[in-house]
Amino acid sequence: QVQLVESGGGLVQAGDSLRLSCAASGRTFSSRAMGWFRQAPGKEREFVATIAGSGGVTHHADSVKGRFSISRDNAKNTVYLQMNSLKAEDTAVYYCAATWGPSSTRSNDYAYWGQGTQVTVSS
């Protein structure tokens, strides 16, 4: 069983930065690919970024490429999402997720999810 706890969300202005953290339980963290997803009100959950267990391979959605960056610290069992140049359309609940499989952009490939952290960007 894996437990994921996100933190770092909040209310910011457009152009500001935030760093989200996701702390994971369990000894197998470094074996798991991790992902960040988000869900805005009235919209479906969408992929944001994913990172391989080793941290060597990352992939970001086109909508955040160049502004957001996913990383991980396996010694701390933590994955991060650095968000720069935030826009109003980035407002959403952000979720981290873990999978036994390879990195994926599909939410159905992730078995474990955190409770989410709210990010609100005012324009």
Image (tube, rainbow, N blue to C red):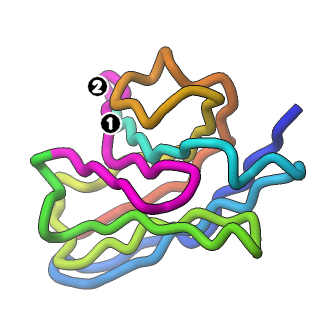
Q: Is 38 colored magenta in this rendering?
A: no
Q: Nearer the viewer, residue 100 or 123?
A: 100
Q: Answer above or below: position of 84 versus 2.
A: below
Point out residue 30 in the picture as x, y percentages from the top left corner: 69, 54
Cα distance in 3D space between marks 1 and 2: 12 Å
Mark 2 residue type: Lys
Q: Is residue 112 left or right of residue 72?
A: right
- The residue sitting at 31% across, 46% down in the picture is 48
Point out residue 66 in the picture as x, y percentages from the top left corner: 13, 68
Q: Nearer the viewer, residue 95 or 117?
A: 95
Q: Answer above or below: position of 105 versus 68.
A: above
- The residue sitting at 38% across, 74% down in the picture is 82
Residue denoted by label 1 = 47
Q: Is residue 17 left or right of residue 15?
A: right
Mark 1 residue type: Phe
Pointer 1 and pointer 2: residues touching (CB < 8 Å)?
Answer: no
SS at mark 2?
Answer: loop
Residue that lies at the very extreme toward the bottom in this rendered image: 16
- The residue sitting at 76% across, 74% down in the picture is 76
Classify residue 42 by image quadrant: top left
Q: Answer above or below: position of 87 versus 102.
A: below
Q: Answer above or below: position of 68 versus 50.
A: below
Q: Which mark is residue 2?
A: none
Q: Which residues are magenta?
A: 42-61
Residue denoted by label 2 = 43
Classify residue 105 by image quadrant: top left
Q: Is 52 colored magenta in this rendering?
A: yes
Q: Is residue 29 left or right of residue 117?
A: right
